[in-house]
Amino acid sequence: MSESIYVGVDLGGTTIKVGICNAEGNLLHTYEGPTGTADGVDAVIDNIEKYVRQIVEDSPYSWDQLAGVGAGLAGFTNIREGIIILAPNIGFRDVPIRSILEGRLNKPVKIDNDANVAALGEAWSGAGRGVENCVCYTLGTGVGGGIIINGKVYQGFAGLAGELGHISVVPDLEAIQCGCGNMGCLETVSSATGIIRMANDAVSRGDRTSLSMVEKIAAKEVFDAAKAGDEAALRIVNRAAFYLGKSMAAVAAVLNPQVFIVGGGVSKAGDILFDEVRRVFAKLTPEPLQTGVTIVPAELGNDAGIIGAAGLLLRS
């Protein structure tokens, strides 16, 4: 075999996932092992190196075919210098991870944050395959994002582009403070955390809702109640969808992407969420800016981060 391969590393607080991709973005092999955060920074780096070497050794490919390694993680990164500034979930602060791994592996290494690599994964071989310009939302505990322009991750001058969850969309009279310190961010209403908060507020107000019978409300239960016709739950879902669609209208006016890709746990709600997001986007976006634009669910699930990390070697 003479084709080049690319290894992606998804660096989580509990588990390190690694995968081999080819130049087309196809995921060929995966491997995972414990992160080892309790044993300190050096142990985590040892494990990254070990797992990268292990997956290549266990594959039909040779070390010489490895063109490079990409890594994605949740935290603040200096992408250009390859430094993890702060990643609390793995205990890293000011760690020059790129230079360390390049020295150990003798291969090119690139890093980026988890939202960017997930977006790149979807653009490379998922819901955005074949599309040069797309924007990816990740709706989970918070709202993450990634921007792909001309097939490559757009990082901004400080590497912080794509913080879609911190677009201010909620009017002042309805806004609450976001974890970032600002008021009215998208994350406060369209994340799982925001949906759960609104549901608990409805129960506390005494709204007539089946959610009052749930001991600990999760976002899925809000969506299930809405699908069953619960009016209070439906209002919450429509509010989350409205502000998501509103944010997309603003992004469309600036970037004019061809596809909006929505991933993360909240996106699994399906049509009850997507139909309303599309309706709001169509209402709030000037016609020329919505022509040919689609809003679709992500396809790669938990593999998006591995694939996108591998893609950093080719598309960043």
Image (cartoon, helix red, strand yellow):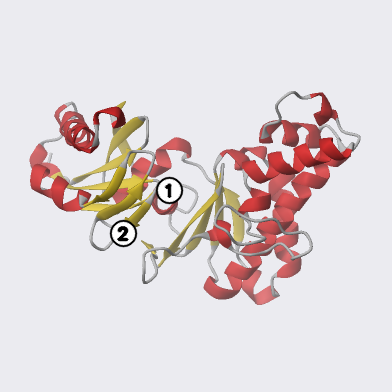
Residue nearer the viewer, 41 or 52: 41
- Residue 253 vs residue 223: left or right? left
Q: Which residue is mark 1?
A: 118
Q: Is residue 163 in view from this perspective?
A: yes
Q: Is residue 45 left or right of residue 162?
A: left
Which is nearer the N-term, disc 1 or disc 2? 1
| Residue 182 vertical placement versus 263 (above, below) | below
Question: Which residue corresponds to the image point at 61% horizontal and 52% vertical from the top-left?
Answer: 187
Amino acid, disc 1: Ala
Residue under the image location 24 percent in, 34 percent down = 40
Query: Could you tell me which secondary element the residue under label 1 belongs to?
Result: helix
Please give left or right for residue 166 compared with residue 121 in the image.
Answer: right
User: Please, is residue 238 above or below residue 62 in the view?
Assistant: below
Q: Position of residue 147 (x, y in %)?
A: 46, 61
> Which secondary structure, mark 2?
loop
* 223 to 313, vertically: above or below: above
* Residue 233 screen position, x and y as percent: 81, 39
> Which quarter shows the N terminus?
top left
Across and down, in percent, residue 103 comes to 9, 48
- Name the disc covering residue 315, or none: 2
Disc 2 marks which amino acid? Answer: Arg
Determine whether label 1 and label 2 are within 8 Å by CB.
Answer: no
Label 2: few (<14), some (14–19) or many (≥20) C-alpha neighbours in 10 Å = some
At x 22% / y 36%, what residue is drawn? 48
- CA separation in Å, label 1 and label 2: 13 Å
Residue 160 tag number = none
Estimate how packed mark 1 is, as few (under 14), some (14 to 19) or many (20 or more) residues with alpha carbons within 10 Å. many
**Left or right of 297 on screen, residue 119:** left
Q: Nearer the viewer, residue 297 or 233?
A: 233
**Rendered-image quadrant of the C terminus:** bottom left
Q: Position of residue 281 (x, y in %)?
A: 70, 63
Residue appearing at x 11%, y 43% in the figure:
105
